[in-house]
Image (cartoon, grey):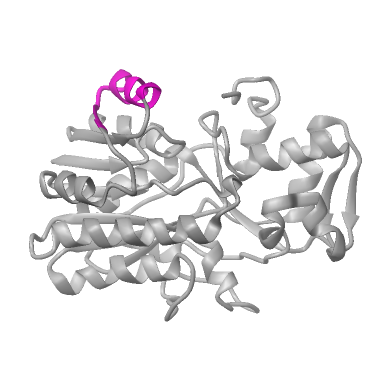
Amino acid sequence: MRVLVTGASGHVGSALLPELLDAGHEVVGLVRTDAAAEAVAALGAEPLRGDLDDLDGLKKAAASADGVVHLAFKPLGDGDFAGAVASDLRAVAAIGEALAGTGKPFVGTTGTMLVSLAGVSGREGTEEDAFPAGPRIDAENLVIGLADRAVRSSIVRLAPLVHSPLDRHGFTPTLIAIARAKGVSAYVGDGSSRWPAVHTRDAARLYRLALEKAPAGARLHAIGDEGIAFRDIAGAIGRHLNVPVKSIDPAETDAHFTYLAPFVGVDNHVSSTRTRALLGWEPTHPNWMEDLDLGHYFDGRNAV
């Protein structure tokens, strides 16, 4: 299968490309820079210059592929979340237009956080949870809706903590950087809010399985750890940095956690039971705590 991957040189993309190539697929990676093109080529894939705002280019690239995995999303750290959401929605629509009526697979990306942010509380969130509208939910629903237009479309909801030595800019290195800069590893309130996690290479394998055999309209959860208490996340980071670990008042959240503030207090307890049964997917790499204890987040191996 000739597969177009957006965000090919990014965190998950850099694990997905070898995963696809090792399975015998031909891969075209969408890239924005010369450095990204070199990285994609070094992995054995074909780089294609373009970006999410070049909708005609996206349509052309998607139409020439046998399947598409859409990973790219503009960085949250840029401070324009609404703009990133709008750009993603336009990109999904363009890819969907190119694939409509073909029966080809299209795997999109959102996050498990949207399950809790959309209002699921007091129980474990599942793949069956769906919502009418909202940031990133609109793109998810557009991908799922393509199943009615003869596209074998599916969504992978990524855990907020996608971790591995490939992780340069995710939530784990961001939390570590904040704790290092502030001299304290903090959690909000009693720290009982839970975040799920998944190893990058386990997530990459799930994307491959979704591309190869997920049924049209499937929502999938890339979850290894179903829920790590945020106080335990803060505690592990504090232990490795040798800084104090403490609770902060919710009123201090914005000042301490900056753009992560809307998420740190969210209890995102979710399950991947249906995903595992549907695709035979099981995480095999270290869990978040084990991965942190390997030391790569603290010894420079995750540096840009």
Residue at x-position 73% and y-position 37%: 176
* Residue occupying the far left of the picture: 102
Res. 271 visible in picture: yes
Rendered location of residue 96, percent (x, y): 21, 61
User: Which quadrant of the figure contains the C terminus?
Assistant: top right
Rendered location of residue 65, percent (x, y): 13, 44
State the residue in front, 62 or 52: 52
Where are the magenta residues, as a range?
Answer: 34-48
For residue 35: magenta? yes
Main secondary-structure element of the magenta-colored stretch: helix
Residue at x-position 80% and y-position 58%: 253
Residue at x-position 43% and y-position 42%: 202
For residue 168: magenta? no
User: Which quadrant of the figure contains the N terminus?
Assistant: top left
What is the number of callouts on the image? Answer: 0
Residue at x-position 85% and y-position 39%: 182
Q: Is 247 located above or below residue 239 in the figure?
A: below
Rendered location of residue 173, percent (x, y): 65, 37
Res. 276 visible in picture: no
State the residue in front, 19 or 144: 144
Rendered location of residue 78, percent (x, y): 57, 46
Judge left or right: residue 215 versus residue 170.
left
Q: Is 264 located above or below residue 114 in the figure?
A: above
Judge left or right: residue 151 versus residue 36.
left
Q: Is 246 located above or below residue 48 in the figure?
A: below
